[in-house]
Amino acid sequence: MKKMRTLAATVLSVSMCAGLAACGGSSANENTTAAAKADNTTAVAAESPAPDDEPIVLRVLSAQQAENPEGDIERSISDAYTALHPNVTFEYISVKSSDFNQKLTALATSGDMPDIFQNSFNMLPSSVDLDVCEDLTTLFEPEFLDKFEPHILKEGYYGDRLLYIPTQSMPAALLYRADWFEEKGLQAPETWDDLAAAAEKLTEDTDGDGNIDRYGFAMIGTKDSSAGTRFQLIMRSFGCREFYEEDGVWKTDVGNDDFKKAIQTFVDLDLVHHAAQPGVIETSYSEAANLVVANKAAMMLTGSNALGTIYSQNPDLKGKLASCAVPKGTEHVSSPRSLGYSVYNKGEHKEVCKDYLKFCMEKENNLKWTEISYRIPVIQDYYDEPILQNEDTIGFVDAIQYSYEYPQFLGLTKSYEIIGSVYQSLLTGSSDIDTASEKAKAEMEELIKSYE
């Protein structure tokens, strides 16, 4: 195919639609669908490149196609690209997030890899293991990469290779009910002690029937990535690293005094302050978000995408929510929690993939993720947009500066169950903190050995 010309297009944003349906929105059957026609709400003010004689179909593996409205956003962008380049169409392979790694492995094993596939900060190690990612530093010019927020772009790297281009970010922060804080004369919590005190005051029987019906903190206590990625933030805020590399050797802080402080701080929100909802160990992200939606929880640790989930179900909460940095034990922390695309390293259409990914980064396209599902853009120059200056979003944007480097240990996801067993054993009273911590330390060290 002839080299794509630089696009000087302005694509109008799609109209607002239903908000994000959580980490795992409404699922679609795994199927393959084509996105070839331009969205009728999209206007293009640029000359399309000269047509190529050979039609090109870019195959895209995406978990966002199984979600609403993410699938529609993704298609609107590829539709707009097809409007500029009619010979290029897109064929989506839709798969639920929970099945993504299994599907990617199956496609890689069978030699049926797509041209582009979704990737993220927590899926990257698995794709590295499969050896299917093009090093994008060989495709993209340094001048283009310099436009990205550096903490976000860093998540796409494995060593010195850039293996996926972030297209959106869901930085971690504390989401809270600003109206309830104002009623109680509370300030946004700076420390975990501040959060515990505020959570106690906000836990109430609001209708006077003798039963607590509002909780200070929506506590996520499952033994999976839903809780694990959030508890990592608490650990890190106390200086405890789940994994770190030293002289080429992986190590862990799990089991040390900082780990115990993080665990105790977390479980005490329920056991001591009585500020968490019933059924903590069965509460994952979706249940916690639903508590906020139902006006039953004042705070939760989450990414910015939760705003889309919450507003889609309860629009009346707009203007009542605010965000701030994750409270500190010894320091504030965050994770950009980026999502983007990798290019198959043996694909035939790498230059077209490159041109399309650049198109995704144009302002109107990148901001669609913010306008509809409250995901933060990845290009620094877009942060002055009014939607990112509101009380509900600005804390997520500001939190990016506190980002820590995500450990690229291949067995990271297996640590969630190990660490989750510690806080669950304390919440249920089946173990004490010293015994549970020692057990977790031994299991983490064994996990590290299994990857040597």
Image (spheres, helix red, strand yellow):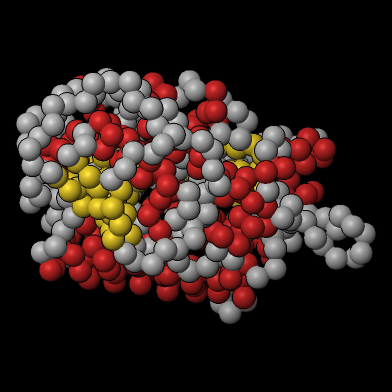
Q: Where, quadrant-wise, is the C terminus in this rendering?
A: bottom left
Residue drawn at the location 21% of the way across and 52% of the way down: 59
The reply to whether residue 420 is visible in this rendering is yes
Front residue of 247 and 379: 379
Left or right: 231 in relation to 33 = right
Residue drawn 58% across and 79% down? 430
Return the residue nearer the eye: 344 or 393: 344
**Left or right position of 76 against 257:** left
Q: How many marks?
A: 0
Q: Position of residue 85 (x, y in %)?
A: 21, 34
Q: Quadrant of residue 405?
A: top left
Instruction: Say above or below: 140 vs 249.
Output: above
The residue located at (52%, 49%) in the rendering is 20
Query: Residue at horizontal 42%, vertical 63%?
Result: 28
**Residue 287 quadrant:** bottom right
Reply above or below: 425 against 192: below
Of residue 17 and residue 103, the one placed in the foreground of this image is: 17
Q: Is residue 123 visible?
A: no
User: Where residue 393 sits: x, y (%)?
Assistant: 56, 34
Question: What is the quadrant of the N terminus in the image?
Answer: top left
The image shows residue 394 at horizontal and vertical percentages of 55, 30
Q: Is residue 406 above or below residue 53?
A: below
Judging depth in this view, the residue of 255 and 150 nearest the camera is 150
Q: Residue furthest right?
A: 208
| In this rendering, position of residue 392 left or right of residue 383 | right
